[in-house]
Image: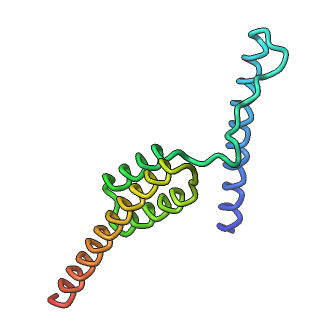
């Protein structure tokens, strides 16, 4: 009986969320119609084939390194950034910049892996002494 009540409550919450979303979209459309537009504006979509710039990836790399996340999680995030960097092609200047960013990411990954390994060994030593 409790499972049915929980399922019913989740359905009611989901339908309420959908209704609130509908109201938010409907009100936005009405505002544009009140301004004299006959139809709502088209939203600009990002192009499917456009990749993130090296500058943005560099900033993302710096943000991951400066974050307070555990080292293992930072390594995973940096590897994702490195895959995005590797997907960027281009002229000789861009390739040099890409190579420099890759070297910086690899250095950070190796440092974080050493830090994670040291933390793991320190935790194992604490467990053995206890």
Q: Residue drawn at (18%, 83%), measured in percent from left and top?
A: 126
Judged from this view, the residue extending furthest toward the bottom is 128
Residue lying at the far left of the rendered structure: 129
Q: Nearer the viewer, residue 92 or 13?
A: 92
Left or right relative to 71: residue 129: left
Look at 56% across and 54% down and name the residue there. Answer: 88
Say which residue appears at 67% left-offset and 68% top-offset: 3
The quadrant the N terminus occupies is bottom right
Q: Is residue 16 left or right of residue 66?
A: right
Q: Is 85 above or below relative to 39?
A: below
Q: Which residue appears at 38% of the width and 54% of the height?
A: 64
Task: Specify how the rendered protein is coloured.
Answer: rainbow
Q: Position of residue 27 (x, y in %)?
A: 72, 24
Question: Extreme front residue here?
Answer: 92
Asked if 27 appears above or below 66 in the picture, the reply is above
Quadrant housing residue 130? bottom left
* Residue nearer the viewer, 107 or 22: 107
Which of the 4 quarters of the picture holds residue 2? bottom right
| Position in image of residue 76 (x %, y %) | 44, 66
Q: Which image quadrant is residue 25 in?
A: top right
Q: Tell whether 70 sits left or right of 10.
A: left
Query: Which of the two residues, 21 or 76, is positioned nearer the viewer here?
Result: 76
- Across and down, in percent, residue 61 comes to 40, 53
**Residue 68 spot, x, y in % from top left:** 31, 56
In this rendering, is residue 64 above or below 25? below
Residue that extends furthest to the right in the rendered view of this protein: 38
* Count of marks placed on residues: 0
Relative placement, left or right, of 120 versus 46 is: left
Query: Relative to 46, is 78 above or below?
Result: below
């Amino acid at each position: 009986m409790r499972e049915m009540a929980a399922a019913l409550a989740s359905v009611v919450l989901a339908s309420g969320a959908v209704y609130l979303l509908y109201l938010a979209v409907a009100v936005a459309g009405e505002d544009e119609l009140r301004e004299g537009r006959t139809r709502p504006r088209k939203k600009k979509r990002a192009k499917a084939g456009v990749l993130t710039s090296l500058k943005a990836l560099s900033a993302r790399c710096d943000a991951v390194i400066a974050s307070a996340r555990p080292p293992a999680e930072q390594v995973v995030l940096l590897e994702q950034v490195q895959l995005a960097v590797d997907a960027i092609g281009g002229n000789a200047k861009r390739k040099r910049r890409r190579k420099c960013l890759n070297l910086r990411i690899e250095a950070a990954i190796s440092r974080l892996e050493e830090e994670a390994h040291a933390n793991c060994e320190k935790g194992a030593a604490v467990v053995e002494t206890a």
